[in-house]
Image (spheres, helix red, strand yellow):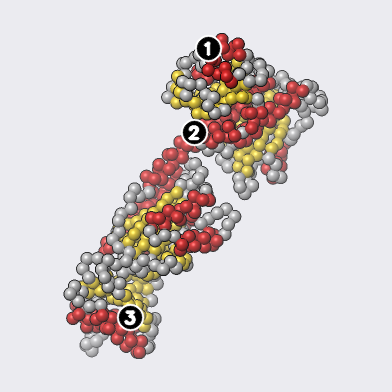
Amino acid sequence: MADRGASALSLPENRPAAPDTILALNHMGSFDWDLDAGLFHMDARAHEIFDLRPDEYDGRATSLAARVPPPDAARLDATVARAIKDGSETYGAYFRVRRRDGTFRWTHSQGAIRRDGSGRPHRVVGLLRDATRELADSPGRAPRTAQEEAFRQQAGIVEAVSAALAHARSVQDVIDALKDTHGIRHLGAASVVIGLVEAGRIRLVAEGPTESFVPGTRITRIDEPYPMSEVVRTLVPRFIESPEEFAEEYPILWPHITELHITSAAYLPLIAQARPLGAMGLLYSDRRGFSAEERAVLVALGSSIAQSLQRAMLYEQEKDLAQGLQQAMLPRTIPSVRGADVAVRYRAAALGRDIGGDWYDLIPLPGGRVGAVIGDVQGHDTHAAAVMGQLRIVLRAYAAEGHTPATVMARASVFLDELDTDRFATCLYAQADLTTGVVQVVRAGHLDPLLRDADGTTRRLDLEGGLPLGLSAEFGRLEYPVATLELDPGNTLLLCTDGLVEQPGADLDDGMRELAERFAEGPDDVRELAGRLIAMAEERGGDDDVALLLLRRREPEEPGARGRLRQHVAPGDPEALARARHLIGAEVRAWGAGERADEIELVADELITNALMHTEGSATVTLRLLTGGERRLRVEVEDSSSALPRRREPQDDGVSGRGLLLVDMLADAWGVEARGGGKAVWCEFRMNPDG
């Protein structure tokens, strides 16, 4: 029962010996060993076998080592290690337990090893029983009676039922496992009823065969004269050994079950940590009475079911708490964005409380821009969700302050590094200007985004990125490259977390290709498209959270407002510069610039010339008609230099320094934006609505 990977108390070598038929009622218990957490849960009977009070045991497997002599403990470790390593499903072993008075008790343990989909062991469930009298005779003796063999089979059934219950993550899972498990039927029960204690009453949650429940007993008070109420009140099993006893002891209930031809019944309290969770009734139609061995098996069965129920209830509570926390951390609503359609989706992990730190956000920014965020904090627990909430808030704050995307990411990384946590986070931040379609993207260890054109063509944007948030600050590498892309009207940008594309044992690129295919074939409506994409995770089940965000740039509402011209001008090519001037002049006149056409052409020429003179590379000029509000034309000139231009007084020659003064005088607005490894100088002109 050691923590996995450490040598402590485990379960020992199998010693050939027959099960003892003279077991007392209190001499069989059950256990549930969580290998990942190193926790060894035991019921009350198992505590008694180890001669421990519940308050003396902290739930750690290593804490039991003091009760087991070192030679036995060494054999126990070897046995469990061997069973885990060779892929065994079960094991059985004998070992000694030192009691309070210093005497020893022989104990036998039978365990079932549960493994995940990859074969990794993560859980052991089984039974513990006092084997002192069993080993009193010669260890090589044969079983003494056929009843002993029957007991062996019954104990195996309890073990099988316990193994089936090990996968239960909800109360309904426990009920389904019991109803679907053949073990209870093999115990000879003709009917099974299970009730849970809720607010001082017992609510029937399962009965079989169907329609065999007694009218008026779906919800009963604990003080009513029913056997299930009695075992909940007294915490003592009730074994009814004949129809006559049933009719005499429970005259209200008996007339309603005579058609089931019940000859005996066993009602077991479902107790966990000295608290009654409910009760279970097994009704038989072909037997009378119960031997001590049979009672012991049934009590062990009740203990195993009670532990599973308690786990399931705690799991559901933690799941509700964790999901509530995460939902509170995510944005309650997504703001409407002028010029764009947005859809978000979030899917919680299939595994109960194992929620993650996935999040999305949409941040309105000054100047008609918007910030789109997708991220994933390391881990799957409430701590990951709490860190996510803090990180989402600071990212939103840094973006709203007007910082560049690279600065937003760097500051968020420093913030996470300074938190009292060992978690890191991947993140992608896209800042979009929906009037121009220019999107600046920063990636911190996150998945690349996907882009779908208006015609359905889809591609993965292979972006240079930096380290995940937290790690980049820790290693002093806070540089985040900024990629710039064009989002034309009708184009859709997809940001998502890895839960949408990752599958155990599958290649990430295969998942991205499948996502790209679904993205390309999906409907035009972004909400329907988001639903189709999240269905990928629903189909696979999956044990990871998924978040996704879709941002589509709308088609312009005004007729003829889709104009855009983009021209590349190489350095040292006078003809390219002349062609650009000619195209700009012709285009802006065709767009209805009117008397401002000459001004726009002159300013564009100045900006292109300035970029070619003061940088070592080429220049790219882009002209756009902007939609929304008044009609405007925007000129952008991009270059590869990160040095910002500055306005200077003209020199004596009357040429140097006049460029930005001219821009400032003729344009209605102008500015400079960082664009990855370079910059863009832009200016805007109000257009005459009459053309």
**What distance separates the C-alpha of mark 2 from that of mark 1?**
34 Å
**In the image, farthest residue toward the front:** 259
Residue 466 picture quarter: bottom left
Q: Nearer the viewer, mark 2 or mark 1?
A: 1
Percent from the top left, x then y, of residue 50? 63, 26
Residue 548 picture quarter: bottom left
Check disc 1 and give the amino acid type.
Pro
**In the image, farthest residue toward the top:** 248
Which residue is under mark 1? 251
Q: Which part of the image, by quadrant, shows the N terminus? A: top right
Helix, strand or loop at label 3? It is helix
14 with respect to 34 (left or right): right
Helix, strand or loop at label 1? It is loop
In the rendered structure, which disc, 1 or 3, sits on the residue that comes first in sequence?
A: 1
405 with respect to 262 (left or right): left
- Residue at figure coordinates x 55%, y 54% from the top left: 503
- Residue at figure coordinates x 40%, y 43% from the top left: 325
Percent from the top left, x then y, of residue 155? 68, 28
Label placed on residue 611: 3
Check disc 3 and give the amino acid type.
Ala
Q: Is residue 241 above or below residue 165?
A: above
Q: Which part of the image, by quadrant, shows the C terminus? A: bottom left
Q: Is residue 377 above or below residue 38?
A: below
Which residue is under mark 2? 313
- Residue at figure coordinates x 64%, y 32% from the top left: 182
Q: Decide which of 508, 1 is in the foreground and name it.
A: 508
138 with respect to 191 (left or right): right
Alpha-carbon neighbours of circle 2 within 10 Å: few (<14), some, or many (≥20)?
some
In the rendered structure, which disc, 3 or 2, sits on the residue that comes first in sequence?
A: 2
